[in-house]
Image (cartoon, helix red, strand yellow):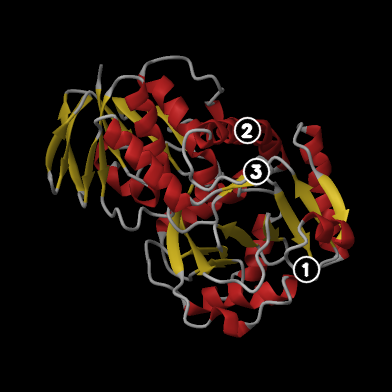
Amino acid sequence: MKHVAIIGGGVIGLSAALECARRGHRVSVIERAPTQRGASLGNAGMIVPSHFTPLAAPGMIALGAKWMWNPESPFYIKPRWSWDLLAWAARFWKASTRERVDRAAPLLRDLHLASREAYARLAEEEDFGLVKRGLLMLCKTARALEQEAQMAAHARALGVPARVLDAKEAAALDPNVTMDIAGAVYFEQDCHCDPARYVATLEQRLRAAGAELIYDAEVTGWHRDEARLAAVHTTRGEIAADEFLLAGGAWSPALVAELGLRLPMQAGKGYSVTVPQPVEQPQLCSIFTEARVAATPIGNTLRFGGTMEIAGMDKRINPRRVAGILRAIPEYFPRFRPEHFEGLQPWCGLRPCSPDGLPYLGRTRAAPNLVVATGHAMMGLSLAPVTGQLVGQIIDHETPRIDLKLLDVDRFA
């Protein structure tokens, strides 16, 4: 049995903690802000084998250049001088090639499918709102539908089922909501859940397993014993351990800078608004393709989320970003009107975005007993269970069941 100290109590850290506890290890989870947890609590809750394309992909640079001057667009970079941002953008541009995307796609497919399987197993024992009805990529225009149809063909080539639907077929698949679209692509293996209930389920299981949850604790430094890490310093005291896991989301790079570990990362701020009594309640989750807005039924509520705002570690809510999400909703769901969103409190969270759109997962040369699991960008919830399983294998010095070469923690060192 080892003592594993986990820095970060979001979906990645808690999923890894539960796997380590299942393997018989003593676990301590250190979380700085349990009521916020980075991007874990208010996200769209989607589990998406359909998302096998990393954020850094051909065409994203052109889209970013087109959108970045519009503060209500799906992607926005706040103008500022930052060497880290410039270096990240250069790496992003270098990674946005068809060759790199083709190499990453089978890996992301395997990770998402393994996570989906783990979610399904957990749902047999716990109710965290898992719904296995698929996802619709809703397209307003014929051009967008044609582009999504090409993506569907790519998905099928990878073994991910995908069907192209016209407007009537999409309406028949989810008759509870009125749609104004040209057509859709249906990914039947995609799922959704309530992310807050998933976090609560993990916490409950960890407490039952005797894990220590150390909340409202900031990491302030490290104590080395020669090459190895002996302890982590926090505002709640020093915590000694045998193994350490960094799962601190967008805060991760700052937490390990003193160790000489470079983790190029930008915080991608996302927003969501949850409607408590929607005028219509779809049964499937969906993505408004052109607007890059997600719609997820969570219990009796309906959550709309989206945007990628690169603005540093600023957690303030930008009303223009929220307005862009709300403006897009009636274009796809015409029964919704602006008054349906009055008085609702928006949520925002910081997603950890690596330059190549792939997570950092594995051990690092910075310290032999430090494991890193961060940088999942918009795929954190979807990849949480499989990330936890792989962390457990890494902690126990087993060969991971999935090849993690593309996720090498030191690949930008």
Q: Earlier in the sequence, mark 3 or mark 1?
A: 3
Crowd class of label 2 (few under 14; some 14 to 19; many from 20; radius 10 Å): many
* Residue under label 1: 179
- Image quarter in which the N terminus is found: top left
Q: Secondary structure at mark 1?
A: loop
**C-alpha separation, residue under disc 3 versus residue under disc 2:** 13 Å
The percent position of residue 385, horizontal first and vertical second, equals 48, 34
Determine contact: label 1, label 2, CB under 8 Å: no
Lateral position of residue 195 relative to residue 233, left or right: right
Dot 1, how many residues are within 10 Å of its Cα: few (below 14), some (14-19), or many (20+)?
many
Identify residue type, mark 3.
Answer: Lys
Residue located at (78% from left, 61% from top): 175
Gap in angstroms between the C-alphas marked 1 and 2: 29 Å
Counting from the top left corner in percent of width and height, residue 130 is at 56, 45
> Tag on residue 132?
3
Work out whether residue 264 or residue 11 is closer to the camera in this orientation and state it: 11
Inspect the image, locate mark 2, and give the three-letter code of the amino acid beneath it.
Leu
Image spot of residue 176 (x, y percent): 73, 63
Q: Residue 3, located in which quarter of the rendered image? A: top left
**What residue is pinned by disc 2?**
113
Which quarter of the image is occupied by the C terminus?
top left
